[in-house]
Amino acid sequence: MRQKFCIHCGVELSRGTSSLDHVPSKCLLQRPFPPNLQTVRICKACNHRFSDDEEYFAAFLGLLLSDGETESVRSLELAISSNHLIQDNLTDNISVDNDSKVPRLWIEPDNEKLQAVILKNALSHALLGGSIAFCAENAAVNMCAFDVIPENHREQLFGISNDWITVQTGIYRYRLLTSGNVMVRSVLYEYLACEVIFSRT
């Protein structure tokens, strides 16, 4: 077995106490899944712990992207309709901004859940890319919608180029940078831009 320790908690792995985890999380992708979807071995406790955060992430994305017509987000929308706890969580965090000419809805997400999933995938991308499995405590996690990034920076940091790896077109792509600190950038549904920086110190 290639991995001796869980990259998330550091516990020693064995066949009986570990399981394969898909990279990226399958709940963020669309069926049919890519045939060459990669996996890493992590402990069963971490795999179970991340499942709730992943379902929340999928539901949150589905709520943001839902238009009732786009086939690519239907599986994300199902994460909302099938889980009442997630529905309550998201509903409790919706507010209305009446200060503008047109009222706008705002959703304040559970950032800890979102960042946990982004970091989980980034750690796995780094490991599979041959980088040292850095401790998550040394990581800085950033995320924002594409439309709030100035266009010139958006193209420079997240524009499609040859060194991006596309897992599913229009759904998930990522890039691993290893000069200096290890950095993983990912783009979900060409809407959410994510960046995780692992410090070497």
Image (cartoon, rainbow, N blue to C red):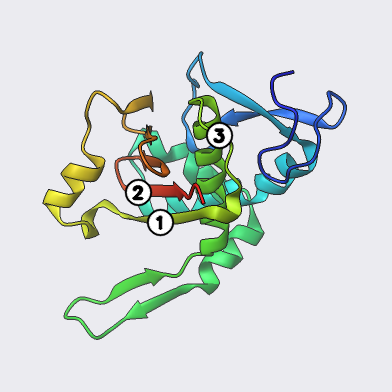
Q: Which residue is mark 2?
A: 192
- Spot the residue most to the right: 16
Q: Which residue is mark 1?
A: 142
* Alpha carbon separation for disc pair 1 and 3: 21 Å
- Mark 1 burial class by Cα count in 10 Å: few <14, some 14-19, many 20+: some
Residue 142: in sight, yes or no?
A: yes
Q: Which mark is residue 132?
A: 3
Mark 2 against mark 1, which lies toward the viewer? 1
Amino acid type indicated by mark 2 = Leu
Position in image of residue 31 (x %, y %): 49, 25
* Residue nearest the viewer, comparing 46 with 55: 46
Q: Is residue 10 left or right of residue 189?
A: right
Amino acid type indicated by mark 1 = Asn
User: Residue placed at 59% from the left, 37% from the top?
Assistant: 133
* Residue nearest the viewer, comparing 17 with 66: 17
Position in image of residue 69 (x %, y %): 33, 40
* Alpha carbon separation for disc pair 3 and 2: 26 Å
- Spot the residue most to the bottom: 99
Position of 80 relative to 34 (above/below)? below
* Residue nearest the viewer, comparing 153 with 64: 153
User: Residue placed at 60% from the left, 59% from the top?
Assistant: 86
User: Residue placed at 26% from the left, 51% from the top?
Assistant: 146
